[in-house]
Amino acid sequence: MSLFQIVEVKKTFKNGEVDEQVLKGINLTLKEGEITALVGASGSGKSTILTISAGLQRASEGRLVFEGKNLNEMNQEQIRKIRARQFGFIFQSSHLVPFLTVQDQLMVMLNVSETKLKKHEQKEEVEKLLKIVDMYHRKEAYPPSLSGGEKQRVAIARALIHKPKILFADEPTASLDSRRTKDVMTLIRELTRTMDITTLMVTHDEEMLSYADQIVTMKDGLIQ
Ligand SMILES: Nc1ncnc2c1ncn2[C@@H]1O[C@H](COP(=O)(O)OP(=O)(O)OP(=O)(O)O)[C@@H](O)[C@H]1O
Ligand SMILES: [Mg+2]
């Protein structure tokens, strides 16, 4: 079943006097529970289509249909709610808050998503997920004391703690070596399968393509 549809999406940036059309009519369907990998040369528009799909910036034209509704017609507050409750994000670097402990990074996300869980239930959920990503033993630690792979495992847990429907990931393993890449991708794949999460992931890394159900190549603002 299609959970998210990108229909004829275009994006034009104004660079000084010049209009640059970065996306020229993107069509893509994300199927429920699947990982879609987005590949293509630097500057081809991968991050742009990802952030537009995630409601982090607006399309100039086209439709982004999530559960039957067009994101591009919603106001900022409607988009904010969907982002906070239904979407999860992982970026190239983990973007953890340096002055929050590992467990508090996840607690904050539960607050942002306005979960109905009681405080003690939130704590239980956080601990459960930290065990799954093998970071429970560091739950009191602060990010500067974690390794790159550990930070990214916390970032994965933070992206998934509110059980989003869609996970958006922009080169989630770019800062990791080959072994850590495998660990992190295996984790993303296992978690998204068990939690029935649909994933759109930008990658440069050939190794990661074996984890994808669908591979889409972008070139000059179009899907090939
Ligand atoms: N806010 C912006 N204002 C102006 N131009 C932008 C903006 N964001 C992106 N661009 C331009 O749009 C093009 C596509 O950028 P994008 O970040 O989507 O590429 P990418 O495929 O993710 O590249 P990379 O693999 O290097 O991350 C680039 O030429 C970039 O300079
Ligand atoms: Mg990019």
Image (cartoon, rainbow, N blue to C red):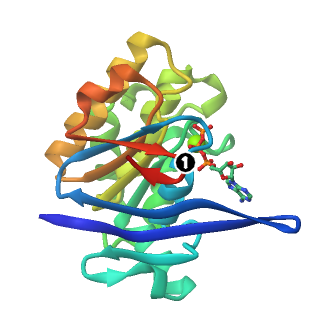
Q: Residues within 10 Å of mark 1 (few under 14, many from 20)?
A: some
Q: In this picture, is 38 found above or below 174?
A: below
73 on left or right of 57: left
Residue 199 percent coordinates (x, y): 31, 49
Q: How many discs mark residues in the rendered view? A: 1
Q: Residue at x 39, y 11 (%)?
A: 179
> Could you say which is closer to the camera, residue 157 or residue 64?
64
Image location (x, y in percent) of residue 121: 29, 60
Which residue in the rendered view is the most extreme toward the left? 1
Note whether 111 is above or below 134 in the view shown: below
Q: Circle 1 sits in a helix, a strand or a loop, which is it?
A: loop
- Residue 126 point in image, percent of width and height: 35, 48
Question: For residue 96, what is the image quadrant?
Answer: top right
Amino acid at circle 1: Asp
Q: Please say if 178 is above or below 43.
A: above
State the residue lying farthest toward the right: 16
Foreground of the two, 19 or 80: 19
Quadrant of the image for the N terminus? bottom left
Relative placement, left or right, of 54 versus 162 is right
Spot occupied by residue 13 in the image (x, y as percentages of width and height): 71, 65
Residue that badge 1 annotates? 220
- Residue visible at 52% across and 78% down in the picture: 61
Q: Eyeballing the image, is 222 above or below 181? A: below
Residue lying at 49% horizontally and 13% vertically, measured from the top left: 177
Is residue 99 shown left or right of residue 153?
A: right
> Closest to the observer: 36 or 60?
60
Residue in view at x 53 percent, y 42 percent: 91
- Confirm or reject: label 1 Cβ below 8 Å from ligand 1: no
User: Horizontal placement of 16 versus 118: left or right?
Assistant: right
